[in-house]
Image (cartoon, rainbow, N blue to C red):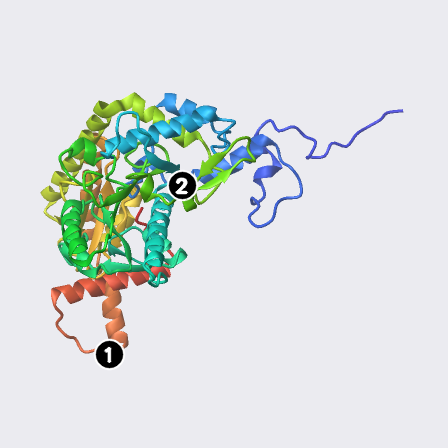
Amino acid sequence: MVLSKIVTRTDTPIDCTFASRYVQTAPPKYKMPENSIPKEAAYQIINDELMLDGNPRLNLASFVTTWMEPECDKLIMDSINKNYVDMDEYPVTTELQNRCVNMIANLFNAPLGDGDTAVGVGTVGSSEAIMLAGLAFKRKWQNKMKQLGKPCDKPNIVTGANVQVCWEKFARYFEVELKEVKLSEGYYVMDPEKAVEMVDENTICVAAILGSTLNGEFEDVKRLNDLLVEKNKETGWDTPIHVDAASGGFIAPFLYPELEWDFRLPLVKSINVSGHKYGLVYAGIGWVIWRNKEDLPEELIFHINYLGADQPTFTLNFSKGSSQIIAQYYQLIRLGFEGYRNIMENCQENALVLKAGLEKTGRFNIVSKDEGVPLVAFSLKDNSRHTEFEVSDMLRRSGWIVPAYTMPPNAQHVTVLRVVIREDFSRTLAERLVNDIEKVLVELDSFPSKITQKLIATEEEHHKAVVKKTAIEVQREVTNAWRKMIADRKKTNGVC
């Protein structure tokens, strides 16, 4: 008697994923599948979709690090299964975080004696760091107002309109009024005089930005400190300063060591910095440093013992990976002051090369400053035919991700493009980008203006009278029309 077995396709081993049934169906999007699939098929399906992502090295919108040395990559992979919160189980990792806090605090000129331990903590980025710093300011202000027998239900923070969205999140999540100093054309950072004028008894702190997201410019923290010292003397208040050094904290100490922006100024009580930006670590690490212990209220610190020993914790989350902390320590001891300075100088030089190339075209106004974060923000001198959004869109065809965005109030009629110069952006890439921008301009010049056509069609449809508009009115109209077109296409340009 001959026995036979019918082999189903499920039982067939996979010799080639592309010859299997697993590539014949769409991947699950809403519900977990009923059956398992081979690991090779799962990898291939996901890897194929990820190929459609942009190239991180060519993502010039982001400040976040996209390259590290292979030795550090190995350290990251070796520690990827360590939960940082298990301090008793991973005491060395905790020690490495403490070393990073001490090194960064000294870099920011914290008033520490020999052997003193700095006050600070690692976070998942500057957003969490700002939340923690803001909570410390709010609690200190509340305690002070309660002692004085005054209401403590209407705290506010004074910032520039150029702050990153995490400040708006803090204000909304923790019920703090955000008082913004409006910008103006040609001046895209917070004006210290206007900021101090907005300070009142309910101001928990003034937030200064060391490296604006919009154009990389450093705000004048020393001027702000001096003005606030005088106001505090006049009013009897003690309004402090927080410095958001997310982008500039790992730049200023190396390129501008004489610039006073940090704990050398008496009213600066806390500073945040992104390790995953110019701290040269992959995404997922930030730091917040306090001037001294008195600036971090003890009641905000939790103590737990269910992981094996008493452990203080002051974070918004609990579990997180250890890899980025270890990577930060690697960079600090691997590069040292000399290495960081060399890298920042290279970034600055490549920014100047890109700026010179753009100026040579004669088509752009440079909005960024030479002193600040190494980036180039620029706008078209004439955007009546084609806009910065079109330039950004067409550069993607060559793989470049260059964001276009409008400035905050009261400069929202100004549209800029921005290129962030990171460690892995070489002079070769800078020159190639200029060449590709020139090609885009030539191609755009050969096209009829989409925006102009859209505006003309709209005017004809509604039988509007032709009225001569000023240059700024045309610019605003073009910008609004393009923004509507982008929205219609459900396409957004982020500012990172």
Task: Please report the residue visible at 26 percent of the width from the left and 49 percent of the height from the top.
Answer: 392
Which of pointers 2 and 1 indicates the residue nearer the eye?
2
Amino acid residing under circle 1 = His
Quadrant of the frame with the N terminus: top right
Q: Is residue 209 left or right of residue 8?
A: left
Earlier sequence position, callout 2 versus callout 1: 2
Q: Which mark is residue 53?
A: 2
Name above or below for residue 450 compared with residue 79: below
Q: Is residue 36 left or right of residue 439?
A: right
Name above or below for residue 70 compared with residue 58: above
Q: Nearer the viewer, residue 478 or 194?
A: 194
Q: Secondary structure at mark 2?
A: loop
Q: Secondary structure at mark 1?
A: loop
Q: Which mark is residue 114?
A: none
Q: Nearer the viewer, residue 24 or 241?
A: 241
How many other residues sit within 10 Å of disc 1, few (<14), some (14-19) or many (≥20)? Answer: few
Q: Which mark is residue 463?
A: 1
